[in-house]
Each structure stands twice: as structure tokens, then as C-alpha cells.
Image (cartoon, rainbow, N blue to C red):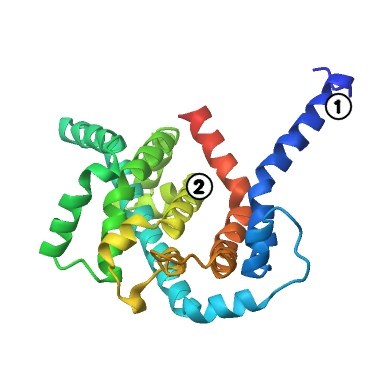
């Protein structure tokens, strides 16, 4: 393989840097305007701030009751991901190792469910949630996320588990391992790259989701997530951009740190699944 540094390589690097800077433009607008007074944002939102107005952050913190919103978002995200990982990994393993007609039909149903747009089932969802008393409840919202997220998660695990040799599990059974022991002691540790990928993808979705929490949690201030609290800065006649932008920075900061810490595992998981699957 030719590893020489040519002018073509230099051109591609410059192009990649330019494309990278274009993707960073929204972050510039977000960060620079979050420390400006409201009048300065309206005057020129693209200019650098004349002076850093950190009061936007303190006001946004108090207005949106950030500690409560952060706690709600964290609980919903963590418990939803734990449920999705446990349920989906076990279901996918069962479908792979027991390829009966029912399991094949069930997997087909999971795949088909991924193409159904969320907007088409909003009204039935709310009616079903009210029937089972899942509305105005954080556990109820977690159950809804399990229902919506399990299809894609099972699909990802299904492709990855096919790459694990059956002989490893048979050897564990010969050594006296129970079926649950085979899964949790042998199979599940081998799923680590895909599990981390699933954790990151679902964390990005659930943490930033606005529509489903707004339908299930309602207007109770004590149950608001970070996106719902941020929306409180926008009314019919007023839009508090200075506070909203500061709230957005505080809201996305935890999930950006989590994504940057885990991004290399996403590439590992997707690559492993595509090659072995």
C-alpha cells in the first residue's frame, strides 16, 4: 500500500478541515449568543460578544429548575437504556439460537416496526398510556421508551450475535453452565462493543427527545425533562433567546461529554457488526 504524503492527501486534509469547521458553525452561534444580552443577539447574532454575560446561565438555571430537570432526564435515560439492553440482548439471543417459525415472525415484526413513523401512532399511544395509567409518570415514560426502542436494539443485537460461534456456548454447557449462565457469563461479555454502541445511540435519542415526554409527562413542572424545561422560554408572544441558549448549552453538555468519551466504541461496534454479521 502506498503511504506517501502527496499533494492529493494535503488537498483532502484541507477539505476535511473546511467541512469540519462548517459543522462547528452551529456550536459557535450557540456558545457565543448564550453569553450575550438579548438586545445584542437581536442586533447581530453572528458577531462575537462584546462582554460575557454569565447572568444568562444563572437565570436559566433558576427558571428551568435545572437540578430537577437534570435528575428527571438522567433517570429516564439510564433506566430506559438498562431495560433496552437487557430485554433486547436476551430476545435477540433467543431468536438466533432458537430459529423457530414464531421467533422468525417475531423478528420480522420488530424489523417492520422500525419503519412506522412516530407521528402516525401518537394518538393511539396516548390513549393506551392513559388506559394503563402510564401518563404523568416517569416509569410510564420509561416503559414507552422500551416499546419504541426495542425494535432497533433487537435488530442490532441480532446481527451481532450471529457472529458469535455456537461452539463457545456448547463448550460452556458441557462444562456445566446453565442456559442463563451461558448468556450472562459467556455471550453478554462478548456483546460489549455493540452494547456500548446501543447505549450511546439510545442516550442521544432519549436525552434530547422532546415529543414523547411532552405527550406522556404533560405540564407537571416536577416531571419536566431538560428539553421540556428549555421549551418554557418560548411562549406565544415572547421568546427569551438569551436564556434559552444558555439552557441549551447546559442541557447538551452532559450528553456531548458522554458521546465524546464513547465515540470510539460506536465505530468499533458498527465495524464489528458489519464485518462479522
Whole-percent x and y of residue 252?
A: 56, 61
Whole-percent x and y of residue 175?
A: 38, 49
Dot 2: few (<14), some (14–19), or many (≥20) neighbours within 10 Å?
many
Whole-percent x and y of residue 116?
A: 27, 37
228 shown above or below 92 = below
Alpha carbon separation for disc pair 2 and 1: 32 Å
Q: Residue at x 84, y 20 (%)?
A: 8
Residue 1 in sight: yes
Task: Tell whether label 1 touches label 2 (CB within 8 Å).
Answer: no
Q: Residue at x 40, y 58 (%)?
A: 81
Whole-percent x and y of residue 94?
A: 28, 42
Q: Residue at x 27, y 57 (%)?
A: 144
In terms of sequence position, does the residue under pointer 2 or pointer 1 come before the other?
Answer: 1
| Disc 1: which residue | 10
| Disc 2: which residue | 197
- Answer left or right for 117 relative to 172: left
Q: Secondary structure at mark 1?
A: helix
Q: Residue furthest left?
A: 131
Amino acid at each position: 500500500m502506498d503511504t506517501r504524503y502527496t499533494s492529493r492527501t494535503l488537498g483532502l486534509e484541507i477539505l476535511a478541515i473546511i467541512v469540519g469547521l462548517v459543522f462547528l458553525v452551529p456550536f459557535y452561534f450557540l456558545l457565543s449568543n448564550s453569553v450575550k444580552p438579548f438586545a445584542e443577539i437581536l442586533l447581530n447574532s453572528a458577531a462575537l460578544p462584546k462582554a460575557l454575560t454569565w447572568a444568562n446561565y444563572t437565570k436559566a438555571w433558576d427558571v428551568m429548575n435545572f437540578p430537577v430537570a437534570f435528575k428527571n432526564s438522567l433517570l429516564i435515560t439510564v433506566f430506559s437504556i438498562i431495560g433496552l439492553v437487557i430485554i433486547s440482548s436476551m430476545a435477540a439471543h433467543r431468536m438466533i439460537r432458537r430459529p423457530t417459525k414464531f421467533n422468525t415472525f417475531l423478528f420480522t415484526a420488530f424489523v417492520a416496526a422500525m419503519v412506522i413513523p412516530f407521528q402516525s401512532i401518537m394518538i393511539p399511544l396516548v390513549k393506551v398510556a392513559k388506559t394503563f395509567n402510564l401518563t404523568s409518570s416517569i416509569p410510564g415514560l420509561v416503559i414507552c421508551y422500551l416499546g419504541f426502542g426495542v425494535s432497533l436494539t433487537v435488530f442490532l443485537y441480532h446481527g451481532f450475535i450471529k457472529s458469535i460461534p455456537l461452539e463457545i456456548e456448547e463448550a460452556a454447557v458441557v462444562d456445566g453452565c446453565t442456559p442463563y449462565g451461558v448468556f450472562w457469563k459467556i455471550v453478554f461479555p462478548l456483546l460489549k462493543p455493540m452494547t456500548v454502541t446501543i447505549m450511546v445511540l439510545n442516550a442521544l435519542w432519549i436525552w434530547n427527545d422532546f415529543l414523547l415526554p411532552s405527550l406522556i409527562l404533560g405540564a407537571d413542572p416536577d416531571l419536566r425533562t431538560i428539553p421540556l424545561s428549555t421549551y418554557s422560554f418560548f411562549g406565544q408572544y415572547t421568546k427569551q433567546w438569551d436564556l434559552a441558549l444558555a439552557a441549551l448549552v447546559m442541557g447538551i453538555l452532559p450528553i456531548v461529554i458522554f458521546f465524546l468519551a464513547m465515540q470510539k466504541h460506536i465505530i468499533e461496534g458498527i465495524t464489528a457488526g458489519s464485518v462479522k454479521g
